[in-house]
Image: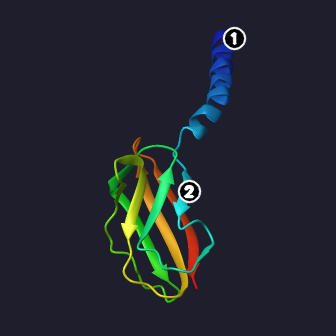
Amino acid sequence: MNAVIKQSRRAGWLLLLLFPLISYAHVHTEKSQPAKDEVLTTAPKVVQLWFSGKVEAEWSKIEVKNAKGERVDDGAVSNVGSDANSLQTGLKPIGSGSYEIRWNVISHDGHRVKGSSSFSVK
């Protein structure tokens, strides 16, 4: 019985030591263009997101909505060039106002990454 308890304690300590390594392994958003809360004088034609690891464009979604909640993105998501750590979506012609970006991205290891940001055009 003592051997079982010792083995359980060792397993517990091992999990505690590995947990920080596991949690840091997930992909996270590093930056966006437009940047979070950026105020632009010219409307962008695309929204781009960069992540800390590879993401799957075909399984990911980026939506951009105006203040009325209407989508202004073109619905297509692709990598920025050949950069597997990035995604982008085109925008319909937009005018001045506030816009919200929401993403639901699948990382290369299969984990889901969700987030949001906003920008405005003067």
Residue 67 rendering spot, x and y as whole percentages = 53, 87
Residue identifier under label 2: 31
* Image quadrant containing the C terminus: bottom right
Residue 88 rendering spot, x and y as whole percentages = 40, 62
Q: Amino acid at mark 1?
A: Asn
Q: Residue at x 41, y 57 (%)?
A: 87
Q: CA distance from mark 1 to mark 2?
A: 51 Å
Residue 58: name its quadrant: bottom left
Which of marks 2 and 1 precedes in the sequence?
A: 1
Residue identifier under label 1: 2
Residue 4 rendering spot, x and y as whole percentages = 63, 14
Quick one: 28 or 109, which is closer to the camera? 28
Q: Residue at x 48, y 79 (%)?
A: 43
Q: Residues within 10 Å of mark 1 (few under 14, many from 20)?
A: few
- Name the outermost residue toward the top: 3
The correct choice, above or below, for 29 with respect to 8 in the image is: below
Q: Residue at x 36, y 80 (%)?
A: 92
Please state if 2 lies on the left or on the right of 105 as rendered: right
Quick one: 58 or 5, which is closer to the camera? 58
Q: How is the image coloured?
A: rainbow
Residue 98: name its quadrant: bottom right
Residue contact between numbered discs 1 and 2, judged by CB atoms under 8 Å? no
Q: Amino acid at mark 2?
A: Lys
Q: Secondary structure at mark 2?
A: strand
The correct choice, above or below, for 38 with respect to 2 in the image is: below
The disc placed on residue 107 is: none
Q: Secondary structure at mark 1?
A: helix
Labels 1, 2: front one: 2
Quick one: 73 or 4, which is closer to the camera? 73
